[in-house]
């Protein structure tokens, strides 16, 4: 059935205008003033509201086995929470166990994702290196439609890969038209700092923050950028949380490197004082990596979004319950890392960003949807209110208010790190490929409504550096040759 969204202001990343939007089936059919509703069409009057492209969260972990337990939100509950908050697509991290085939891990994630209520895609993680991984990366790109590969520079002894593996994988990405992602923390130094604090009696959640200072993130970001430059590929730095990492990205971009940075809504709005709460549960619920930072780092992250040196706001949604967090009582290294945020990302960012003047409404669309759609090569199918685009739309009421409460959220965890935050600006209607998924507080999306979104390899501009490296790299000196 056709839907006519009448009387709103369409907001894209580059312009806004008063216009009606006609949806027919899964796509947008027309945009213009005073459109006529086809016979039998549903008409939604949205005067005073904005019509935005659905949000895209490029960093989530649904039903993830990690640190001896499984995150509470699966693809059904997580995507339903996302839709309630105006996010119509997630990109989840498919993480093979060390030694596991990427192809087997992909099949595992596809089975889990059959319950998704919104559209979704995957990043594939590189957790070990061998000829098998090199070969399977081509299948992942060409057959499975995944054009990004995640690398952990942290979690020593578990998921961490070393510099040699990074270079091999980055080079393979360059040749395939894929882009590497990095979790940038110096895992060796973090491991030693964890030992140091535990040996000196620091066992609570504050030890998590102490053992992962901004310097270890800044160093790792610099190192990953250098390796990507040598391998001739672009780079995406996930959960950029501090000034040091942001400055590394900004320097690289100023030098002409294709480097992208992704702050989280948690790092933009919450700070490390939570780790020093006398309430152990309160502090442990906020343990994630990188940890919340001192408040002064937030100014750098906001400046990055304003200037364009940082491009995307995500959540790293990985929800562990309070009971799961208590696995780390007496040893902060055993507290499962992760918090929620999918349902709250867009309302909190609008409240803290647009309503304060830090972001324009167009910049809000850019950092929640359009930029990541372009970075991941799914624009303008996603990330745009445009004729022919998927009808992933959010009717955004800038005057609507709510106070975030764990008791009213759709996520399965029993707390919310934003609990008590007063938001002004909320989704009134969320459409997912033309179907009403959320309407005035009523969730209508069902398990299985979502579709997998494959992504094509990146165009030649992204891999031109790789070709240049191959053409200009010094060849090995043959026996008997004389060098100048």
Image (cartoon, rainbow, N blue to C red):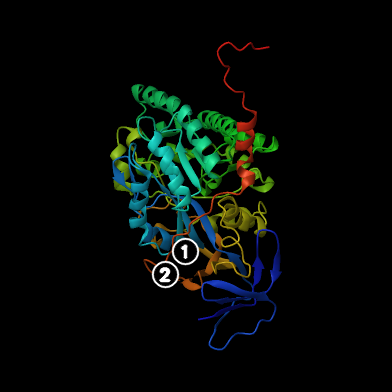
Q: Quadrant of the C terminus?
A: top right
Residue 141 or residue 199, whichever sits in front: 141
Looking at the image, can residue 440 be seen? no
Tell me where residue 336 appears, x and y as whole percent. Answer: 35, 41
**SS of the residue at dot 2?**
loop
The residue that label 1 is drawn on is: 83
Image marks 1 and 2: residues in contact by CB distance under 8 Å: yes
Vertical order, 368 against 476 (above or below): below
Residue shown at the point (38%, 38%) measured from the top left: 132
Q: Quadrant of residue 24?
A: bottom right
Q: Quadrant of residue 200?
A: top left
N-term-proximal mark, 1 vs 2: 1
**SS of the residue at dot 1?**
helix
Tell me where residue 112 appears, x and y as whole percent. Answer: 34, 56
Q: Is residue 158 left or right of residue 170?
A: left
The residue that label 2 is drawn on is: 445
For the image shown, how many numbered marks are present on the structure?
Answer: 2
Looking at the image, can residue 261 be seen? yes
Vertical order, 381 against 32 (above or below): above
Residue shown at the point (54%, 36%) measured from the top left: 294
Tell me where residue 254 appears, x and y as whole percent. Answer: 70, 37
Tell me where residue 68 appears, x and y as whole percent. Answer: 28, 41
Give the class, few, some or many, for how many residues have Cα within 10 Å of label 2's Cα (few <14, many ≥20). Answer: many
């Amino acid at each position: 059935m056709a839907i006519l969204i009448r009387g709103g202001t369409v907001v894209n990343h580059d312009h806004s205008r008063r216009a009606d939007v006609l949806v027919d089936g899964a796509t947008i059919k027309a945009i213009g003033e005073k459109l006529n509703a086809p016979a039998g069409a549903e008409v939604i009057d949205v005067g005073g509201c904005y019509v935005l492209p659905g949000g895209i969260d490029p960093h989530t972990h649904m039903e993830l086995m990690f640190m001896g337990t499984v995150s509470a939100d699966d693809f059904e509950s997580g995507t339903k929470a996302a839709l309630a908050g105006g996010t119509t697509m997630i990109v989840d991290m498919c993480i093979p166990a060390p030694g596991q085939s990427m192809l087997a891990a992909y099949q595992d994630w596809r089975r889990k994702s059959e319950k998704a209520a919104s559209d979704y895609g995957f990043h594939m993680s590189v957790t070990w290196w061998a000829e098998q991984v090199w070969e399977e990366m081509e299948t992942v790109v060409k057959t499975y439609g995944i054009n990004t590969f995640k690398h952990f520079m942290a979690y020593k002894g578990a998921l961490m890969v070393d510099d040699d593996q990074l270079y091999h994988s980055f080079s393979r990405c360059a040749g395939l038209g894929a882009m590497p992602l990095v979790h940038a923390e110096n895992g060796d130094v973090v491991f030693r700092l964890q030992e140091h604090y535990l040996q000196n009696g620091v066992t609570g959640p504050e030890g998590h923050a102490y053992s992962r200072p901004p310097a270890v993130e800044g160093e790792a970001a610099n190192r990953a950028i250098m390796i990507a430059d040598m391998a001739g590929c672009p780079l995406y730095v996930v959960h950029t949380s501090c000034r040091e990492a942001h400055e590394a990205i900004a320097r690289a971009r100023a030098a002409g490197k294709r480097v992208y940075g992704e702050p989280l809504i948690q790092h933009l709005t919450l700070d490390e004082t939570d780790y020093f709460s006398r309430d152990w549960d309160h502090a442990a619920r906020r343990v994630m990596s990188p940890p919340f930072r001192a408040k002064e780092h937030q100014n750098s992250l906001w400046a990055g979004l304003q200037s364009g040196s940082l491009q995307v706001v995500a959540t790293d949604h990985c929800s562990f319950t309070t009971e799961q967090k208590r696995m780390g009582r007496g040893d902060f290294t055993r507290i499962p890392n992760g918090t929620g945020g999918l349902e709250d990302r867009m309302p909190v960012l609008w409240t803290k960003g647009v309503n304060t003047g830090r972001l324009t409404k167009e910049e809000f669309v850019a950092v929640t949807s359009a930029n990541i759609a372009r970075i991941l090569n799914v624009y303008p199918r996603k990330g745009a209110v445009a004729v022919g685009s998927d009808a992933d739309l959010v009717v955004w009421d800038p005057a609507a208010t709510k106070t975030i409460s764990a008791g009213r959220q759709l996520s399965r965890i029993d707390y919310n790190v934003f609990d008590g935050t007063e938001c002004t600006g909320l989704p009134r209607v969320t459409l997912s490929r033309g179907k009403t998924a959320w309407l005035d507080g009523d969730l209508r999306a069902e398990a299985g409504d979502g579709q997998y979104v494959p992504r094509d390899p990146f165009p030649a501009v992204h891999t031109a550096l790789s070709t240049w490296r191959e053409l200009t790299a010094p060849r090995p000196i043959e026996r008997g040759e004389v060098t100048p």
